[in-house]
């Protein structure tokens, strides 16, 4: 196995579990203990993890995704403004994709369109949709424990069975040059594929995400309509030159 392949697998395990044990990596990757130690040293030097006794843990930085419980209580007012604006873009009879995440989850109480069909990779989302009697499909695949998002190759295969009028995608970073980004490469694949299968893409991000850059790129700003509660003035010109914005005050 090539070094970069080992790096990718180590980071994937960290995204899922938050920590990895040295011995587990040795067994899973079929490499020597000294090789895995060197890999962890190299990844730490790249600031992608921190070594701990007997293994490694995620840094609180670009490659780390906050858990669902943590995100639920952050920027609540802003998320509700964004959720209301986003839900207002849904029309009667449309088939839409709702990405996992707390902002897209907040859309569900605001959906007023009739005869809507929703596909999602969010466990919390499908529960809320069913409670509101909205026809819904949950992608199959591997469930990320701390974000309750379905990811992986099975989810990607499931996704290819659908076509969407619109998709609503969450993001951790909005940057004029780097585009939309998220910490987890596997979640990025799901988001990107949903975008590819949709007639129109909306990206939901509160103002704290503007100017931020995470580990994995989704797509360029021009590929989606940005929905936010407000654009910081020092970013406004650069963002508006790259994409359409739907904006509303809290």
Image (cartoon, rainbow, N blue to C red):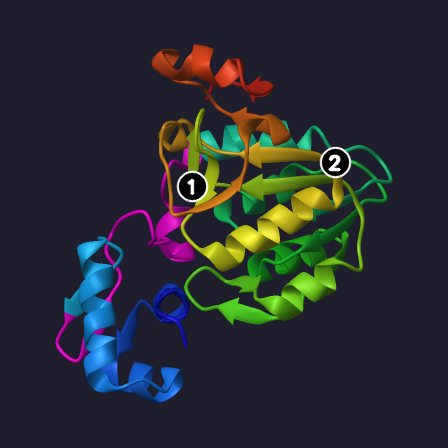
Rendered location of residue 88, percent (x, y): 69, 28
Left or right placement of residue 176 versus residue 96 in this view:
left
In this view of the protein, which residue sits in the foreground, 156 or 44?
44
Residue 237 falls inside the magenta stretch: no
Which of the two labelled residues, at mark 2 and mark 1, occupies the earlier sequence position? Answer: 2
Would you say 194 lies left or right of 239 here?
right
Position above or below: 223 against 16: above
Q: Quadrant of the N terminus?
A: bottom left
What residue lies at 41% left-to-right and 68% top-to-bottom?
5
Residue ID for mark 2:
112
Q: Total of numbered circles in the picture?
A: 2
Nearest the viewer among 24 and 147 is 24
Q: Position of residue 8 (x, y in %)?
A: 40, 65
Indicate whether 140 appears above or below 101: below
Q: Residue at x 38, y 36 (%)?
A: 75
- Which residues are the magenta region? 52-77
Side (left or right) of 27 relative to 38: right
Residue 145 percent location from the top left of the image: 44, 68
Q: Residue at x 23, y 53 (%)?
A: 46
Give the residue pinned by disc 1.
172
Residue 51 occupies quadrant: bottom left
Numbered mark located on residue 245 in the image: none
């Amino acid at each position: 196995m090539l070094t970069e392949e080992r790096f990718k697998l180590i980071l994937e395990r960290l995204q899922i579990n938050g920590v990895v044990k040295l011995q587990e990596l040795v067994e899973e990757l079929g490499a020597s203990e000294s090789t895995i130690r060197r890999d962890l040293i190299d990844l730490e030097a790249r600031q992608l993890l921190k070594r701990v006794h007997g293994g490694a843990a995620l840094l609180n930085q670009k490659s780390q995704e906050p858990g669902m419980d943590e995100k639920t209580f952050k920027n609540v007012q802003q998320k509700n403004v964004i959720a209301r604006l986003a839900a207002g873009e849904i029309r009667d009879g449309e088939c839409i994709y709702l990405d996992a995440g707390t902002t897209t989850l907040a859309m569900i109480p605001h959906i007023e369109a009739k005869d809507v069909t929703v596909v999602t990779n969010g466990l919390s989302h499908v529960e809320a949709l069913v409670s509101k009697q909205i026809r819904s499909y949950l992608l199959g695949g591997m469930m990320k424990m701390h974000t309750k998002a379905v990811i992986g190759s099975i989810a990607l295969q499931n996704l290819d069975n659908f076509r969407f009028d619109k998709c609503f995608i969450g993001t951790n970073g909005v940057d004029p040059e780097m585009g939309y980004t998220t910490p987890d490469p596997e979640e990025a694949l799901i988001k990107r594929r949903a975008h590819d299968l949709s007639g129109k893409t909306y990206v939901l991000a509160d103002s704290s995400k503007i100017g931020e850059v995470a580990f994995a790129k989704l797509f360029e700003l021009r590929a989606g309509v940005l929905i936010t509660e407000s654009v910081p003035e020092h970013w406004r010109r650069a963002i508006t030159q790259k994409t359409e914005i739907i904006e509303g005050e809290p």
